[in-house]
Image (tube, grey):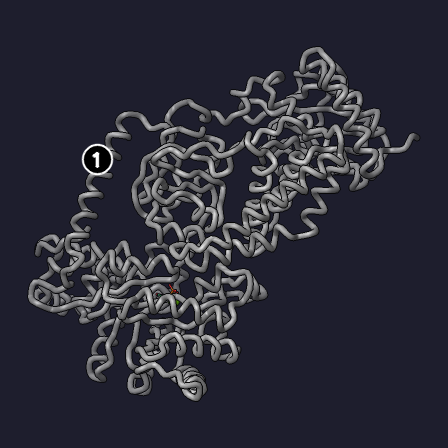
Amino acid sequence: MTDAPAGASGARRLLRRLRDLMATGGTAQERLDRIVTLIAGEMVAEVCSCYIRRAGDVLELFATEGLRREAVHRTRLRVGEGLVGDVAAHARPLALANAQSHPNFAYRPETGEEVYQSLMGVPILRGGKVHGVLVVQNRTQRSYADEEIETLQTVAMVLAELVASGDLVNPIELAPADGIGMLPTRIEGVRLVDGLAMGSAVLHEPRIVIRRVVAEDPAAELERLREALARMQSALDAMLAADDIGRGGEHRDILETYRMFAEDRGWIQRIRETIRGGLTAEAAVQKVQDDTRARMQSITDPYLRERLLDLQDLTNRLLQHLAGDEARATELPPDVILVARTMGPAELLDYDRTRLRGLVLEEGSHTAHVTIVARALDIPVVGGAVDVVARVEPGDLVVVDGENGTVFLRPGEDVQQRFAEGMVARAQQRAAYAAIRGLPAVTRDGVRVGLQLNAGLLIDLPQLDATGAEGVGLYRTEIPFMVRSSFPDIAAQLAIYRTIVELAGGRPVTFRTLDVGGDKRLPYLPPSEDENPALGWRAIRMSLDRPAMLSQQLRAMLMAADGAVLRVMFPMVAEVAELVAARAILERQRERVARAGIAPARIEVGVMMEVPSLAFQLDALLPRIDFLSIGSNDLMQFLFACDRGNPRLAGRYDVLSPPALAFVRHLVAACGRAGVPLAVCGEMAARPIEAMALVGLGVRVLSMPAAAVGPIKTMVRSLELAPLVTYLERHRGSAVHSLRSHLNAFAHDHGVVIE
Ligand code: PEP
Ligand code: MG
């Protein structure tokens, strides 16, 4: 037996021969025939076959050395069928010493492959999509080495370019059935940020076409890589150095994370090794990315997935730098609908905000950082838009309907017309909200309701002026912690809190101490092993177990509020003893900063009502606090023992059901007796009909995202409270599932504006 190609030099020799072969004349099919023969010889395999993906998710045998010739263009497998289909379906290599015993083996008599025992197959990938499968087979039970898989993967990259050339298969066939400049398409996704937008599609990752795969001179390619890395580094440094207050400290933290990755020796080393194996710099970067993507498919850990996505973002930046002027971003259209598989928050902030209208993501979730940033920027976002990147062409007209979670690609006249009207209506509504910005939220019968903002990013703060909100009712301190690559020290925390206080311009800010743990992960803390994260080691439980962490946070808040009022609120308090312990830590920190001459004018301490047990200790609780804030998101899921993230239970229990309203009523009465102000800062406060019920029950402070202030103020100003109080009183003790329809009817009959 001759030697199989070993390591980089074997792969390089094979690639060189491939390059020479590609340069010879003949049709693409003839070249493919010669390629499979060459690979079989070089890899010491009896069989080498190339399957290419055709329309309808079929893999067709296009060329073979070793199987029966008459099977070419006749043997077809569906994606997912047989071992070849398995490689395509999972976009990952397969190496089996005894292929026929594998449960997925699909025997095709016309090929004569029954005599071959071992099989190694790799996907032919381009831009993350599978275009075919390359297979070698051996008669004996051969165990293929990792280097051999690597070599075959590298060869598959060359084949990917041949397929993409369009000479083998019409490129139209390679696109999904509804793709590329064809019919209008509607994609149902997930609503992540409400709003409506229309504009031209801009692919966040422009399709970089790699024209050269095989390196003429690996040393020159290594040098090109070095230069591109240096350019990328200095671009990142320049972005870091840019003093851009509007973007806030978070932007900087994310860039720091990227810079950390950009210096990752392991990553760069893998690219270098791939170049030494015979690929050009961009092909090597692409290959490392494809490998990463393939690996990612099986990873479910959200933290690791996020880190790998960060790495992928960086890879794209590097590809841009390697492509140089060729891929230099063309001028952005005036109305940009950004389309991406996924993206980081820093990348979103890189775009010219004056042109950004909407965002469509294949992945994405409500709590993803990019969603948080988009919400702060007021850009509608639809996530979970399956295959949108493949189905859209740059420049296509796109409508993003964030209200319904729908994306329209190349919409027809009727849809355009409907959305144009929808946008005019929204603009009018916004203008109406802006017009009442300076007016108080007072009911028609003169009861004032305090409207405040929920915030987490610095860019949320200008919304105080824009909406006329009276202050920040909930500042989620975990958000700046979540977008960092390491735990912020006290100086970093102080800088954030000080900026918040400054930007609030004298309006009150309620700082909530860290609510992490459970599903809110910090990238630098070990992942939670809680079986029920929402009920797990989170929020104040973690803070009390890590008193140094809580002390630092409280000290930073005390220092930021030097000379002013500090409002601090503890999340997820389940019993008064927890508050007592937290207050003791606060007191120690107060004494400590006082020794350095720092003192807030006043300290107001509150807790969040999120755990029902606390409601049975109000007599002990209320004298110890200055305010209580209902975190209805958590409270309702604990009250009903109902996971709010479980779609099977969505709508099962309503926050407007008699027990939920009775709970709020009980709190209103107790707080009223004790003279403790009561607020609601969960989602309930942001929805007009729910907010109406809360006000009717006696809640006088509501805290919500900026976009909700206009609709809630409009509701309050159109409400006559007295009849609502009577109405709610009358339905007290009702046995219905929910009072929602009753309240809707009330609003309708009494002219309460619910938008
Ligand atoms: C809540 O639970 O209602 C709340 C405001 O806190 P968070 O949504 O941050 O858990
Ligand atoms: Mg909560």
Under circle 1, the secondary element is helix
Percent of width and height locating residue 80: 61, 33
Crowd band around label 1 with a 10 angstrom C-alpha radius: few (<14), some (14–19), many (20+): few
Q: Which part of the image, by quadrant, shows the N terminus?
A: top right
Residue at 19% across / 50% down in the picture?
755
Percent of width and height locating residue 550: 47, 77
State which image quarter holds ligand 2.
Answer: bottom left
Q: Residue furthest right?
A: 1
Percent of width and height locating residue 643: 41, 61
* Left or right of 700, for residue 284: right
User: Can I make out residue 94 in this image?
Assistant: no
Residue at 82% across / 26% down in the picture?
115
Quadrant assignment, res 704: bottom left
* Left or right of 534, for residue 565: left
Front residue of 461 and 616: 461
Percent of width and height locating residue 118: 80, 34
Front residue of 84 and 134: 134
The image shows residue 627, relative to residue 505, as above or below, that is: below
Front residue of 27 and 17: 17
Residue at 33% across / 83% down in the picture?
617
Quadrant assignment, res 525: bottom right
Q: Name the residue beneath numbered marker 1.
A: 421
Amino acid bearing label 1: Glu
Quadrant assignment, res 225: top right
